[in-house]
């Protein structure tokens, strides 16, 4: 069964409908897979809920953490974006936000916190010190980027970054979560068959 490529939209020609990239992808996916309609819709609903209810574990060691505190105030109300809940336990968090200088003495603690988080888990590196070592890049005791310790999903540059940059980075993470496959065929693995 083929899906019609030319959609019947009243008073609008097909060529005038400019924002149709996602529709074209959906039509291609339906023509290719066919049976993944329900799972794809459930994936979208689950990922929408997950992306708009991120629970953050804050790992702040210096001035970037102070800048993050401005997000909770009235001027930069982070509740509008769905990530106002911060947790003190890694077992309740979806996301670890690393802000500030990470020394080699703190690196095992950061790795342990990351390992204690449940899957799916995400990491946001905030500020120049976290991303590359910042002004302490040639120091003997500072880790030159936490991506050497744990995998990072989003980098938010700045020294310290403005609240708008925090929001932009968090919205990029939300976009990344929204396109993940949660129940679809790409995520499921086939069990090896036993020989008799």
Image (tube, grey):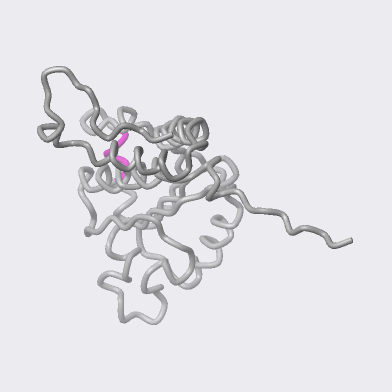
Predominant secondary structure in magenta?
Answer: helix
Drawn side of residue 105 relative to residue 51, left or right: right
Q: Where's residue 194, x and y in %? A: 82, 59
Residue ranking furthest to the top = 10
**How many circles with numbers are drawn on the protein?**
0
Residue ranking furthest to the right = 196
Q: Where's residue 7, x and y in %? A: 24, 27
Residue 86 counted in the magenta span: no
Quadrant for the C terminus in the image = bottom right
Depth check: 47 or 30 in front?
30
- Residue drawn 34% across the image and 38% down it: 27
- Residue drawn 36% across the image and 57% down it: 125
Depth check: 13 or 185 in front?
13
Drawn side of residue 140 relative to residue 39, left or right: left
- Residue drawn 34% across the image and 43% down it: 175
Depth check: 73 or 24 in front?
24
Depth check: 91 or 173 in front?
173
Q: Where's residue 171, x and y in %? A: 30, 42
- Residue drawn 36% across the image and 33% down it: 3
Is 82 placed above or below 181 here? above
Residue 69 counted in the magenta span: yes
Residue ranking furthest to the front = 1
Drawn side of residue 17 relative to residue 185, left or right: left
- The part of the chain drawn in magenta is 68-72
Q: Where's residue 111, x and y in %? A: 54, 62
The quarter of the displayed image where residue 147 is located: bottom left
Is 183 placed above or below 145 here? above
Quadrant for the N terminus in the image = top left
């Amino acid at each position: 069964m083929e899906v019609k490529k030319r959609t019947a939209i009243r008073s609008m020609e097909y060529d005038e409908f400019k924002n149709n990239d996602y529709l074209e992808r959906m039509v291609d996916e339906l023509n290719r897979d066919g049976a993944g309609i329900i799972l794809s819709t459930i994936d979208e609903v689950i990922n929408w809920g997950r992306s708009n209810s991120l629970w953050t574990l804050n790992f702040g060691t210096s001035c970037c953490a102070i800048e993050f505190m401005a997000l909770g105030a009235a001027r930069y109300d982070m509740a509008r974006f769905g990530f106002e809940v911060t947790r003190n336990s890694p077992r309740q968090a979806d996301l670890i936000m690393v802000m500030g200088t990470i020394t080699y003495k703190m690196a095992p603690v950061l790795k342990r916190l990351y390992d204690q988080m449940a899957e799916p888990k995400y990491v946001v590196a905030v500020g120049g010190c976290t991303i590359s070592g910042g002004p302490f890049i040639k120091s003997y005791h500072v880790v030159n980027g936490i991506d050497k310790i744990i995998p990072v999903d989003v980098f938010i540059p700045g020294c310290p970054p403005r609240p708008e940059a925090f929001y932009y980075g968090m919205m990029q993470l939300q976009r990344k979560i929204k396109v993940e496959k949660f129940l679809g065929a790409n995520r499921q693995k086939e069990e090896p068959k036993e020989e008799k």
